[in-house]
Image: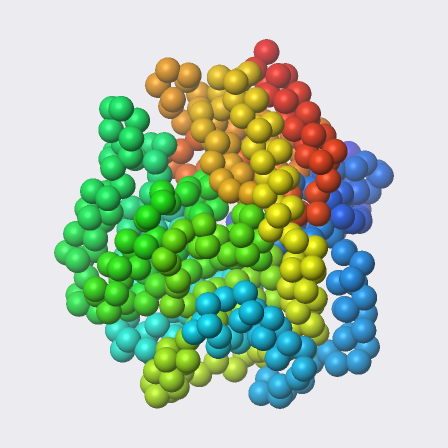
Amino acid sequence: TTHIDPFWQRANKYLMYTGVPPSPMRIVKAKGTRLYDANGREILDFTSGQMSSLLGHSHPEIVEVVQHYVAELDHLLSNMLTDPVIDLAERLASFLPEHLSKSFFLNTGSETTEAAIKMAKCYTGKFEIVAFSASYHGLTQGSGSATYSAGRKNGGPSMPGQLAFPAPYAYRSPFKKADGSYDWETELEFGWSMIDRQSVGSLAAFIMEPILSTGGILEPPKGYLKRMSEECKKRGMLLILDEAQTGVGRTGKMFAYEHEEEFVPDILALSKTLGCGLPLASVTTTAEIERGCKEAGFLWLTTHLNDPLTAAVGAKVLEIVKRDNVCQKATERGQQLRAGLEKLQQKYWCIGDIRGKGLLQGIEIISDATTKAPGADLGQAVSELAMASGLSCNVVNLPGMGGVFRLAPPVTVTADEIEEGLRILDQCFESILT
Ligand code: PMP
């Protein structure tokens, strides 16, 4: 019936196809952890929209802030400063080490990548950018160049000086030993030797996610980030940390890098979760890097730089995250989700691996219990059935990897909703495998 429905007819006629088939669902309302389609059917949202709606859809306090600011103080000249933007910067700094205190605010993750890369180039006077081979940092020209988890064949050559570093993928790494241990240190040395061979001597920055989300929920082992930052320092590079999906409490800490000891990035980028579904993003750095950028003539003055309306949303998000102990909630609900997934793993041979922290979890699907061969098709089938059964989850598929389900419910998810989601997944695995 979809082809005669005027909604889909108009969609076909007027919307440009941008590379991913549209979901067959027509959602008319989103509230809390639930979506409602045009037929009144309820869908449990275990992706927080596009991994963004951290506090659930249309959190009442966010609605109130939007209503107030859209009526009182929506948008000004890009260089006019307002109270909400200073509130947001101050609150953000209160969660960070003292020297990481200088922020500016944008709209999207792609934009933060563009800005951070530009800053690194200005500060170091160099131009080469290194990213993980399973990275996702956006899809604009510069950020897309630093993205290896989406197709590369979408717009010609990448930015000059873009280099890929082997992503830490313990489950399938060639540096995984027969006894199951993962020799990440040798892998890391190998990675750097490849970079040093390819570099023309102009290494400016390494950009990374603390947990590679779109790359398949890959978690660098303990000690990895610290080693990485030491290697960057040695080469005079900045370390840019992209916490688009992991930031603001999702993994059980305010920022995922806090799970690691003795590690602080040079530039921290937040987006998605900071605006909880609204277009807000931040780039934060040190006074020293700010000074270097200024001397090099760094310029960033986009239309929505430091907009009061979305800044007020961000300030409210940070207030709620602290007041409601969101990190604790993400830890508790995350443990519940993880325990449920591990039960499913006992039950179904096709669940090869479970990875993630807090409320960012991934399940990797295999097609053969002995060889653990990737099961991308099976993963796709389960995710489609889950969607049809009322659970919105999404599956990421890189070459050589099983379909990896990403589960990232809002931190406001209830214990009952976690159980409900797990029950739907259980039924989907059951019906696909039998
Ligand atoms: N960085 C990371 C880690 C992301 O996951 C994403 C979005 N998937 C981006 C950057 C790009 O953000 P946006 O789509 O808002 O430009």
At horizontal 32% and vertical 55% (from top left) the residue drawn is 226
Q: Is residue 114 visible?
A: no
With 109 as the anchor, is 205 left or right in this view?
left
Query: Which quarter of the figure has residue 21?
Result: top right
With 54 as the anchor, is 300 left or right in this view?
left
Image height check: is 115 above or below 145? below
Q: Is residue 206 visible?
A: yes
Q: What x and y, as percent, mark residue 101?
A: 48, 75
Query: Which quarter of the figure has residue 58?
Result: bottom right
Residue at the far left in the pictured view: 197
Image height check: is 204 above or below 177? below
At horizontal 79% and vertical 37% (from top left) the residue drawn is 42
Q: Quadrant of the C terminus?
A: top right
Q: Quadrant of the N terminus?
A: top right
Image height check: is 173 above or below 261? above
At horizontal 38% and vertical 75% (from top left) the residue drawn is 119
Residue at the far top in the pictured view: 434
Q: Nearer the viewer, residue 7 or 313?
A: 313
At horizontal 51% and vertical 36% (from top left) the residue drawn is 362
Q: What x and y, as percent, mark residue 251?
A: 54, 48
Q: What x and y, as percent, mark residue 89?
A: 58, 75
Q: Nearer the viewer, residue 269 or 155?
A: 269
